[in-house]
Image: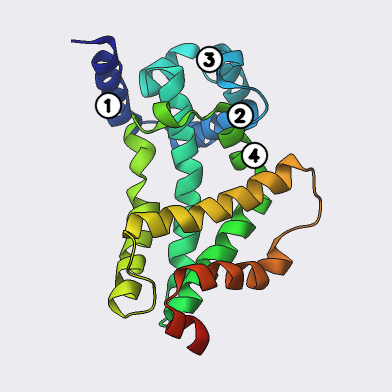
């Protein structure tokens, strides 16, 4: 068995064990992960720092997470899961697909403006090649829900069908993340949400079928 396979098995076992963690303890750990990894690069953070900030033992972190990598990505998954819950909640009752995407766009901007450390963590500590090997990378609650809406919109002739749905997903979230990343990187204090409609219309013209874009 390779070292990578061994790590994957350890992380999987820890993930199964994690369901038994006390909810209040989990919240403290997730907050500590966010606070610390958003300030410094992954290799500059020690597990003992997270343990102290979360007021838990180092043994607890190893028991429930298995490694520093698993801890980081489990924490990120938890925060993105909160975005997914908000997104799903705001989509309830909306029938018009353009309005669904507009709501997703606004909710995402609003979430990252209220939780800028999530973006800072992704900028400072997340390595894509490592993240994609984690079980949490797919985040089905967030991405599967969105892929479903994309598929429905394409079936209705609302979105362009000349590219794969996953490319549309990348395009939408690529624009979103670039906006919030550069907002933080440039140190801009004015929020993006007041401009959400203008920014969304720019994106919509790129992903909607021409006739849908004109008639919407």
| Nearer to us: label 2 or label 3 | 2
Q: Dot 2 corresponds to which residue?
A: 124
Label 2 and label 4: CA atoms lie apart by 10 Å
Q: Which mark is residue 117?
A: 4
Asked whether the beta carbons under mark 4 and mark 1 sit within 8 Å of each other, the answer is no
Q: Dot 1 corresponds to which residue?
A: 12
Q: Is residue 30 left or right of residue 141?
A: right
Where is residue 113 drawn, in percent x and y? 67, 52
Label 4 and label 1: CA atoms lie apart by 26 Å
Mark 3 vs mark 1: which is more N-terminal? 1
| Nearer to us: label 1 or label 2 | 2
Q: Which mark is residue 47?
A: 3
Q: Does the rendering let one see residue 216?
A: no
Can you say which quadrant of the picture contains the N terminus? Answer: top left
Label 1 and label 2: CA atoms lie apart by 25 Å
Label 3: few (<14), some (14–19) or many (≥20) C-alpha neighbours in 10 Å: some
| Nearer to us: label 2 or label 4 | 2
Where is residue 195 drawn, in percent x and y? 71, 68
> Residue drawn at (39%, 73%), measured in percent from left and top?
159
């Amino acid at each position: 068995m390779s070292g990578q396979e061994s790590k994957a098995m350890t992380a999987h076992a820890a993930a199964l064990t994690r369901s038994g963690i006390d909810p209040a303890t989990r919240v403290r750990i997730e907050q500590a992960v966010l606070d610390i990894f958003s300030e410094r690069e992954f290799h500059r953070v020690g597990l003992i720092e997270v343990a102290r900030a979360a007021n838990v033992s180092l043994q607890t972190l190893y028991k429930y997470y298995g490694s520093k990598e698993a801890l980081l990505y489990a924490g990120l998954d938890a925060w993105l899961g909160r975005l997914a819950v908000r997104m799903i909640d705001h989509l309830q009752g909306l029938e018009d697909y353009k309005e669904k995407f507009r709501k997703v766009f606004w909710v995402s901007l609003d979430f990252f403006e209220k939780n800028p450390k999530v973006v800072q963590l992704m900028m400072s500590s997340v390595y894509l090649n490592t993240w994609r090997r984690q079980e949490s990378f797919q985040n089905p609650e967030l991405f599967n829900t969105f892929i479903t809406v994309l598929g429905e919109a394409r079936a209705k002739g609302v979105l362009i069908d000349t590219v794969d749905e996953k490319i549309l997903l990348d395009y939408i979230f690529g624009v979103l993340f670039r906006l919030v990343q550069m907002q933080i990187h440039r140190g801009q204090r004015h929020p993006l949400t007041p401009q959400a409609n203008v920014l969304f219309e720019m994106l919509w013209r790129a992903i909607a079928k021409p006739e849908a874009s004109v008639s919407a």
